[in-house]
Image (spheres, coloured by chain):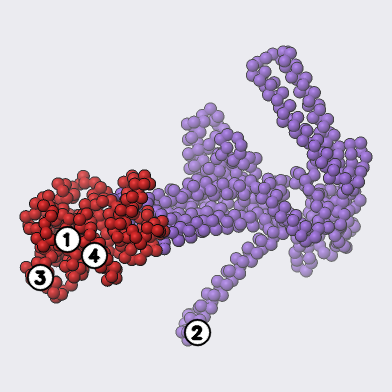
Chain colours: A red, B purple
Amino acid sequence: MLTLFDHEYLDLDNLSDDLTAIRVENLSLQFGTKHVLENISMRVPKNRVTAFIGQSGCGKSTLISAFNRMNDLNPHCRYQGQIFIGQRDITHKKQNVSELRTQVGMVFQRPNPFPMSIYDNVCYGLKLQGIKVRRQLDDAVESALKDAALWKEVKDRLFDSAAILSGGQQQRLVIARALALKPDILLLDEPTSALDPLTTLYIEELIAELKSRCTIIIVTHNMQQAARVSDYTAFLHQGRLIEYSDSDTLFTTPQQKQTEDYITGRYG
Amino acid sequence: MISNLLKRLLSSGQRQAFFIGAGAFFTGVLLLAMVSIVMLIAARGGGYFWPKEVQRVEYISPQGQARVVFGQIESEYQQEDTRVYWLYYSDAASPFAHQSLIEESWMQSARPAKNAARIALKDGRVMLAEPVSVMLPDDAPVSILRLDAVRDKVATIEQRIAELRENVLSDIHLQLTELDSRQVSDAAPARARLNQAFDKWHAQVLALESQRDSYRMQVRLADGYETTLPLNTLYSIDYTSRLSFAEKLTVAVKRVGRFLSESPKQANTAGGVFPALFGTVLMVFLMTIIVAPFGVMAAVYLNEYAADTTLTSVIRICVSNMAGVPSIVYGVFGLGFFIYGVGGSLDALFFRDTLPAPTMGTPGVFWAALTMAILTLPVVIVATEEGLRNVPQDLKAGSYALGATKAETVWHTILPMASPGIMTGVILAIARAAGEVAPLMLVGAVKFAPNLPIDGEFPYLHLERQFMHLGVLIYDGAFHSQTDAKSASMMFAACLLLLVVVFILNILAVLLRSRLRRRYEKR
Ligand SMILES: Nc1ncnc2c1ncn2[C@@H]1O[C@H](COP(=O)(O)OP(=O)(O)O)[C@@H](O)[C@H]1O
Ligand SMILES: [Mg+2]
């Protein structure tokens, strides 16, 4: 079923469960009294790149943070509705968030390597899972760095501090760190907005390669980037999901006035 | 009013220059005061070790008697328009060196005495005299040049005595006690045999001792008075007037070594300060071990776990204010709460059989360390919180995003990143704890402690023991110092040592902190 040709698009409204990575049902979210997300329902397809676009402050980061429950760190956050990953409702009280976050990795806007060696950065998550065997760690580090297209550049200085890497290398290190846990879903929150254009291109290529390994959700401000890397795009406006379709359609023939205004640059 | 005057007299630029100038001036004065205090302590403390020349001093006492003595000028100062010397000297009236104030106008002459030496005894007393000859047991005098050879002989006798005491006599004693414990009758032949052996060996020891004591050194004071000193009581003989600069330096270094490694003598006015140095360092070390984890735990709780409520704000304010509570109050708290409260309860629970004599409920090094830990806790908490606040939010998020729990994030990311801040707190705590005296005197620091808190006796670390502390030693010395130039000098030396200890502890902590900074703050 997953061997569809790239230009054949899935019907997002009637996506079958085995092609769905994330199913969002009537999700609303508030920070204190501020309503940030309003009644969002959507299905994110497996092994595809889905882009979230929208004006600054429209709730993109908040929405993808709901997928690995990073919003829990804010004590004022409340939400209603459900989010299903597989058959599990991850908004459930009994959901183990640590376990969830190992399955749903996240990469942030600013590269945030830990002040440790490159090797230790990649091992961080694995060590938390109790993996201590040196060989196992070595192998995992190597394959994660290869997946993140960083291995060639750092293989001779794995034990140097991650701080000496360039911004783009740091961002790929952070991606490797997440990939080391073999996540099913990778959330990228504006992963290239702090990087120069050439490095950005590099990361975009990487995203295209990673698609076969996991489902990718990318938040971006850059519409060309969304058009280039994503298969599907969701447009959010003031906490509502305005339009969600394959990227070709959304960028060439948007159905909603607000979407059109946004992609033609009338606001944002 | 003054500011109005200034405004009228000076332009704004000039006013600025005036205030900057005044600021610079006062900072300069303060710095100068600090530097001169340190210089004074360094000079007086260092001077304590520098061998002073033994001089032949002739003076007329206020009663009009002409005196001639061997003496060392310990210190001198100007009193109104006369110069006054603290003279440390020996004379016939009291051959062991003592001191008194001599005015310059009484002084007839003072010149180095090449043949006179500073003779220090093992018990800390000193005689300034001219060694004349060595007396053998048959009272036959031999040349003073043979002193070293004869002293070697005495040392062998001394060794033999020690052997007999430690091996033979104590062995017999042990066997006798064993008979006692088996309740063997007094008339038993075994007991008689042992008693006989004991008497025999004991008589031999006594004979050896009297033989040892009959090797003596004949000395002559400046006024011609002669006396003898048993060779085995001698500690060192320094002909300080004969020494070249380099030789004096060697003596000084040796004295520093002894000062650091030996116990005090003559009620803390002579000898070394090793137990006090050891006690200070041990107390600070224990305090650090206690305060660091508790302070860090408290700060982590306040900063990472506790919700931001009025209660936490109140706690924070209390913690900051605790840093300003006078230290003696902590001393009283330690005495009342730890020693009488906790220690007393432990006694009542576990050491009932020895009551009313307290086991735990008495001042000791552990209680002192605990009290100082309470005293320095606010410093550590405040500095650690500062460090925790500086940990970037995105690193915490990065850790959580990899599936770390809160505790794991604290342990693997937040604490390492905050470690320079924690070290700052520990540095401040160490500096404060090493310098405190008043609270320590209530909770375990004493002028003289017979044993170190660490020794070869099980359980090796005796945390319940009282201990000596440099600060207490200085405090004690300061009381003697008005009438005693010698112990004043020793006090300065102890001050210098305390400064050096605090300085070293600080430097170590600062080095550690800058290492941590390089590792965790360069991003
Ligand atoms: N911790 C927070 N507390 C309160 N409001 C927040 C918080 N984080 C974000 N918001 C608000 O939620 C809205 C959505 O934020 P975000 O998801 O970060 O937007 P985006 O990523 O689309 O720029 C914004 O209006 C922002 O002001
Ligand atoms: Mg955002």
Residue designated by label 1: A50
Q: Amino acid at mark 2?
A: Gln
Residue designated by label 3: A252
Rendered image quadrant of residue A57? bottom left
Q: Amino acid at mark 4?
A: Glu
Q: Amino acid at mark 1?
A: Thr
Q: Are marks 4 and 2 on the same chain?
A: no
Of pointers 1 and 3, the one earlier in the residue sequence: 1
Q: Quick one: label 1, few (<14), some, or many (20+) residues within 10 Å? A: many
The mark lying in front, picked from 1 and 4, is: 4
| Residue found at x 72% / y 17% | B191
Element marked by disc 3: helix
Residue designated by label 2: B14
Of pointers 1 and 4, the one earlier in the residue sequence: 1
Q: Tell me the tag on residue A204.
A: 4
Q: Is residue B315 left or right of residue A61?
A: right
Question: What is the spatial separation of the Cα atoms under label 1 and label 4, in whole angstroms?
Answer: 13 Å
x and y percent of residue A11 in the render?
A: 7, 58
| Residue found at x 39% / y 63% | A164
Of all chains, the one bearing label 4 is A
Question: What is the spatial separation of the Cα atoms under label 3 and label 2, in whole angstroms?
Answer: 70 Å
Element marked by disc 4: helix
Q: Amino acid at mark 3?
A: Thr
Question: What is the spatial separation of the Cα atoms under label 4 and label 2, in whole angstroms?
Answer: 61 Å
Residue at mark 4: C-beta within 8 A of ligand 2: no
* Nearer the observer, B76 or A102: A102
Q: Is residue B229 left or right of residue B274?
A: right
Please, is residue A123 above or below residue B180 in the view?
below
